[in-house]
Image: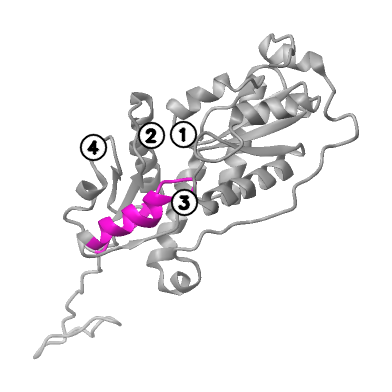
Amino acid sequence: MSPAAPGLPMTAGTLDPVPVAAAAPAPLVLVAHGTRDAGGVPLLGRAAERVGGLLPGTDVRYGWVEFQRPSAAEALAGSAGPVVVPLFLGGGYHVEHDLPRLVRAHGSGRITAHLGPEPIIVEAVAGRLREALASEGAGVEELDGVVLAAAGSRRRAPVAEAETAARELSRLLGTPVRPAYLSAAEPSARRAVRRWRSEGARTLAVATYLLAEGHFSRALHGAGADLVAPPLGDHPAVAQVVARRYRAATVPAAAGAQAGTAVLHTRAWRPPHGADGAGRLHAAGRALTGSTGARP
């Protein structure tokens, strides 16, 4: 008779080990807001594929809160103890109310923190801006300032998160960054650009603190900036934060300290570089957009 392998039970009357099947990992359900814009629909599926590559063997599903199918409820259907990761850059009503209600109705599961202004997310926003500038033969050093455009909310917490992201982006870029919003909060992106122009700034860019192309991202092109960077899309950083949220929710040692808690790094906003920062390189604005730099 063979000796039992360590950690394996033995049946009565024999010393042959009985394998114990490992518990399947908890399903991961990505939930996004939803969009009427067809261009934004593939984002969630691509993000789910990236996350699946980081979490082999995990059942990764996705659904939308509104507008698209599968719905979040459909994505939850048939899953036991799912980990729901809100694919939202900012918190708000959907994250704080709709998703908990859906999980309660489902009968099991847990919800992690949304993406939030994690440093890796803000670095990705900076990367999108640098790529957009490089495509025009320009660099961050030619900008007088950057408007960080977020979706906006009537709630204070999402606005505070956008402010945190703006401070971190300013640190990364080494240039002034001001937050602005596309709905429900002030200033709007257009007003933020106008205000900066009135202070003497000539060359301004918009860094887009959004996930997907859609109505909001298109509206930014009318804000009056010299350049608008694209949304994050399925940037690898998004999948990395999702995987981090999932692991924190499913690893007992980490769950107590990290699960469901957004890591918000706050740093002091850096002032403009030099007294002439607001009025330099008018020509750079023409190089970026062909504009004359006339103020709206």
Where's residue 104, x and y in %? 25, 62
Which of the marked residues, 2 or 4, is nearer the chain's N terminus? 2
Q: CA distance from mark 3 to mark 2?
A: 19 Å
- Please give left or right for residue 27 compared with residue 164 in the image: left
Number of other residues with Cα within 10 Å of mark 3, as a class: few under 14, some 14 to 19, many 20 or more: many
Where's residue 187, x and y in %? 61, 36
Under circle 3, the secondary element is: loop
Tell us which disc is closer to us: 4 or 1.
4
Badge 2 is on which residue? 43
Contact (CB < 8 A) between labels 3 and 2? no
Q: CA distance from mark 1 to mark 2?
A: 6 Å
Where's residue 96, x and y in %? 40, 56
Badge 1 is on which residue? 233
Label drawn at residue 283: none
Badge 4 is on which residue? 69
On screen, residue 93 above or below 12 = above
Under circle 2, the secondary element is: helix
Q: CA distance from mark 4 to mark 1?
A: 19 Å
Which of the marked residues, 4 or 1, is nearer the chain's N terminus? 4
Label drawn at residue 91: 3
- Please give left or right for residue 17 compared with residue 122 in the image: left
- Which stretch did the figure color magenta? 81-104
Q: Quadrant of residue 189?
A: top right
